[in-house]
Image (spheres, rainbow, N blue to C red):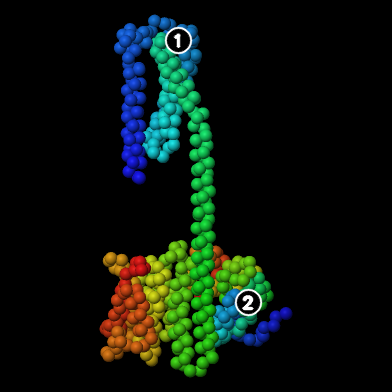
Amino acid sequence: MMHADLTSREPRALIVEDEALIAEELRERLLRLGFSIIATVDSAEEGVAIATRERPDLVLMDIRLRGEKDGVEAAREIRQQVDVPIVYLTAYSDRLTVDRAKQTEHDGFI
Amino acid sequence: MSSPTLSWGSVEASFSTRRQLYAILVGSALVISPFLIWPQLTKRLLATNFLPHRYCFLSDPGMVWTHVVADTLIAIAYFAISITLGYMVHKARRDIPFHWMFLAFGLFIVACGGTHFMEVVTIWIPAYVFSAAVKLFTAVVSLTTAAVLPFTVPLVLSLVQQAKKSEQVTARLRASEERKEILLREVHHRVKNNLAVICSLFYLQSLHSQDAATVQVFSEMENRVHSMALVHESLYGSENLARIDFAAYAEALAEDIFLSYGVPSAPVHLKADLEPVSMSVDLALPCGLILNELISNSLRHGFPNGASGEIKLTLRNLPEGKCSLCVEDSGVGIPADLDVNTNNSLGLRLVRLFTQQIRGSFELVKSDPGTSARLQFTVDYDAR
């Protein structure tokens, strides 16, 4: 059951970030940019579940997350099922992670 | 205590070379003296009053040539092997244990090659006495090698065990090195994360203030902490965990500061001309904080009322391990009465303090147009 208001034109965003305060800052910044926030979650599993069900207009994805899977794996799984822009929340990262992230056709780094 | 040991060592060394010389002399004497005592020996040794070997093969060409070709090839192979062994011992005689053993093998193989060579010769020339002498020599050398070889077995085995043990130690060291690196990366990641949380706190707190000046204070504090977080972030992403590429860092930092001031929607452009400079964390942190103040100052005061312009960032390697970092803007320029050394704004105070900390020099001059801030310092200052 979709609970989003279909008449609403607001872009909808999902935040996947395990640091609560950073997630809260992102939420506030996105709200000010005119986004509505579907959810902020701290694990890859929840991120994948919500992204594939809700098909947000934007996913902000941290690379290190709570649980087994990391953000790159979560992004790959989301990409396999739905076409959603995903932006990683890191400026630099170790080379291996960046290479892996590039392979998953991300839409950008913040 | 050490000098007697030393002199004993040199005595031993000279004794060993002298012993080698004696051995060669005695050996040569033993070989030559029979010829001197018995002048007929040479003649006897090279006697050919027998039937050439080919008559045994009834001069059958197949038999003769099979023997000749096979013996020649064997002789060539044996000589080649001993040359290689000899070369190896010559090149690595200090590192090869029991190099005399290799030489004995070499001599033994040469002798074997010699007997095969004589087999070829005697097909046509019946120098059987000389051939017998070569065989006798081969027998003595082979027997000696065979007799000595078993005594080296325990030593060789212990050497193999030592090599295995040192390999295990090396592997263990490497593993612990890798563990340490992972741990260090983790620490930098945690530090960066904590600083990022502080940035978020500043931002969230600023949302609760209606006062523009207070919001600006929080935003400035957020940028300062962010400039530190970025050092740790670029550290755990870099291959070398002790140093960062300051050029990449400076560009990322400048872009972030521009974003925090609402640029690029404002008409101020960033131009970066940065040479690669590798820095330790101790240097990168204060430099990053200085850079943050300089860029922020330019953005805050250089372009009032939405004026357009450019901020140019330059990083240069200078001679003698020095480095210069410049922030030049094309804005309105600093007030004529501003003195860098006494001005009491927090931004300039921070620049002064950090410049002192990195033993650098700083100047802020009015240029035409705008302001240019120049920082100069030694990159390898961390020998504190």
Badge 1: residue crowd in 10 Å (few <14, some 14–19, many ≥20): many
Q: Which amino acid type is marked by label 2?
A: Val
Q: Quadrant of the N terminus of chain B?
A: top left
Where is residue B247 shown, x and y percent of the image?
Answer: 39, 70
Q: Quadrant of residue B310?
A: bottom left
Q: Residue at x 43, y 6 (%)?
A: B51
Pick out the residue farthest to the right: A1
Asked whether the beta carbons under mark 1 and mark 2 sit within 8 Å of each other, the answer is no
Asked if residue B124 can be seen in this view, the reply is: no
Q: Quadrant of residue B314?
A: bottom left
Name the chain letter of the residue that bears numbered label 2.
A
Where is residue A63 shown, x and y percent of the image?
Answer: 56, 70
Tag 2 secondary structure: strand
Q: Which amino acid type is marked by label 1?
A: His
Q: Residue at x 52, y 57 (%)?
A: B176
Where is residue B19 shown, x and y percent of the image?
Answer: 34, 28
Q: Which mark is residue B53?
A: 1
Badge 2: residue crowd in 10 Å (few <14, some 14–19, many ≥20): many
A102 left or right of B137 in image? right
Q: Residue at x 62, y 79 (%)?
A: A40
Towards the viewer: B230 or B304: B230
Asked if residue B239 can be seen in this view, the reply is: yes
Q: Which mark is residue A41?
A: 2
The answer to whether B139 is drawn above or below residue B347 in the figure is above
**How many labels were placed on the picture?**
2
B375 left or right of B232 in image? left
